[in-house]
Amino acid sequence: MEKIIEILQDIDDSVDYANEKALIDDHILDSFGIISLIGELEEEYDISIDASEMVPANFNSVEAISAMVKRLQES
């Protein structure tokens, strides 16, 4: 999860990502931030994030992002 936090901090370093649980629901990440995050995750973890994965539940917290990444790496 440390690498995911690093990626998020590169996008916006003013957020406490370790404790935030509503990144999408509270509009902390905007559409540009989400697109940047997806690109970085795909590159860093050698995964492909399909449109079906692009739902708020997968991006609201570092834990949710991490769980999605792990799931995609296993498939």
Image (cartoon, helix red, strand yellow):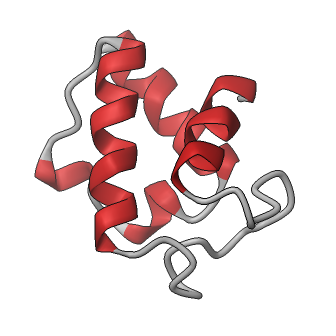
Q: Residue furthest left?
A: 51
Residue 47 x %, y %: 28, 19
Residue 44 location, x and y as percent? 41, 17
Q: Is residue 52 above or below residue 48?
A: below
Residue found at x 36% / y 59%: 34
Q: Residue at x 64, y 76 (%)?
A: 22
User: Taking 12 as reference, is 2 left or right?
Assistant: right
Looking at the rendered image, the quarter that the C terminus falls into is top left
Image location (x, y in percent) of residue 13: 70, 56
The quadrant the N terminus occupies is top right
Going 58% across and 47% down the picture, which residue do you hit? Answer: 8
**Residue 52: image location, x then y, percent:** 17, 53
Q: Quadrant of residue 4?
A: top right
**Quadrant in which residue 41 is drawn:** top left
Q: Answer with left or right where residue 64 lies relative to residue 57.
A: right
Q: Nearer the viewer, residue 62 or 29?
A: 29
Vertical order, 70 against 17 (above or below): above
57 or 41, which lies in front?
41
Residue 75 located left or right of residue 51: right
Above or below, 30 relative to 62 = below
